[in-house]
């Protein structure tokens, strides 16, 4: 029996829910491919429309603009990653082991999940690494935040912060460390491939070494045994 993953998205992210139509799913699928291939700056609704054989007006019926679409796919990714974190740590009792599992998930190459037919999680992960910060580094971030557009990212941080607190209840900065773990995992991966002098991982290009670095940083910081 085929099992599909359905993630409920904030309705303020779209004009029309893309999950409800074939065209909407095609917009999501192909926008991920185009953004990953050519970058967010070069991505336009005109190019997307030509690529999938529809009109720009047809795409605007789903998304207000390309930035809102970027927030949509990044929010989807954070919700999907939270699902994986919760699922894969559900049977782990040791909070330190849970943290290690989170770090492994954040630093490992993401494989395509057959339970979501119209989203290539591997390509989306690459977008998160290279383009993800563009979703919130804007002049209108306060307005977007009031609309709870970044809630999936915050929810993931809260889950990780809970693991940190469980590892050391006396540690004062669990949410700050949680967001640092996420950003470090992605920044070090990006630097490893594009700005090698900013890392110690460029020679081997090893995701496992990034995980070891973050583990050392985390457990030395919170001061719990691991």
Image (cartoon, rainbow, N blue to C red):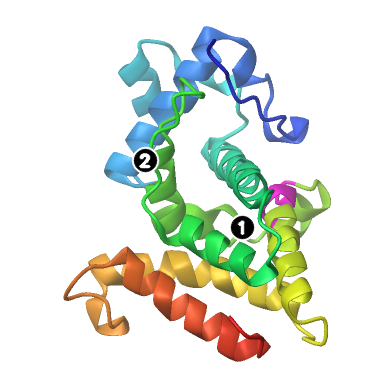
Work out whether 197 lies above or below 89: below
Magenta stretch mostly in which secondary structure?
Answer: helix
Image position, residue 142 (x, y; %): 76, 59
Tell me what residue is drawn at x 46 percent, y 67 percent.
185
Magenta part of the chain: 149-153
Tell me what residue is drawn at x 57 percent, y 18 percent.
3
Image position, residue 143 (x, y; %): 78, 53
Q: Which residue is mark 1?
A: 136
The residue carrying pointer 1 sits among few (fewer than 14), some (14 to 19) or many (20 or more) residues within 10 Å by Cα, namely some
Query: In terms of depth relative to the viewer, which is nearer, 4 or 202?
Result: 4
Work out whether 215 lies above or below 109: below
Work out whether 91 lies above or below 171: above
Q: Quadrant of the N terminus?
A: top right
Location of residue 95 by image quarter: bottom right
Q: Which residue is mark 2?
A: 123
SS category of the residue bearing label 2: helix
Marking on residue 100: none
Distance between mark 1 and mark 2 Cα atoms: 20 Å
Q: Is residue 208 magenta?
A: no
Query: In terms of depth relative to the viewer, which is nearer, 219 or 58?
Result: 219
Tell me what residue is drawn at x 61 percent, y 57 percent.
136
The residue carrying pointer 2 sits among few (fewer than 14), some (14 to 19) or many (20 or more) residues within 10 Å by Cα, namely many
Q: Quadrant of the C terminus?
A: bottom right
Relative to 103, is 97 on the left or the right?
Answer: right
Q: Is residue 152 magenta?
A: yes
Relative to 169, is 156 on the left or the right?
Answer: left
Task: Tell which tag, 1 or 2, sits nearer the viewer.
Answer: 2
Image position, residue 27 (x, y; %): 47, 22
């Amino acid at each position: 029996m085929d099992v599909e993953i359905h993630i409920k998205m904030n309705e303020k992210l779209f004009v029309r829910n893309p999950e409800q139509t074939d065209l909407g799913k095609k917009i999501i699928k192909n926008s991920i491919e185009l953004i990953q291939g050519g970058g967010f700056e070069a991505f336009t609704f005109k190019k997307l429309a030509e690529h999938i054989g529809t009109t720009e007006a047809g795409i605007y019926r789903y998304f207000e603009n390309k930035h809102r679409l970027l927030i949509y796919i990044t929010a989807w990714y954070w919700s999907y990653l939270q699902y994986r974190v919760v699922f894969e740590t559900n049977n782990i009792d040791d909070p330190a082991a849970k943290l290690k599992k989170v770090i492994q998930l954040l630093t490992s190459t993401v494989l395509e999940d057959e339970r979501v037919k119209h989203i290539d999680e591997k390509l989306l992960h690459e977008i998160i690494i290279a383009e993800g910060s563009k979703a919130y580094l804007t002049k209108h971030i306060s307005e977007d935040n009031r609309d709870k557009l970044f809630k999936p990212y915050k929810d993931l941080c809260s889950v990780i912060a809970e693991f940190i607190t469980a590892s050391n209840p006396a540690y004062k900065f669990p949410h700050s460390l949680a967001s640092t773990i996420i950003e470090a995992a992605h920044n070090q991966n990006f630097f490893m491939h594009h700005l090698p002098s900013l890392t110690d991982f460029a020679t081997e290009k090893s995701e496992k070494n990034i995980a070891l670095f973050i583990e050392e940083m985390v457990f030395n910081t919170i001061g719990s045994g691991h």
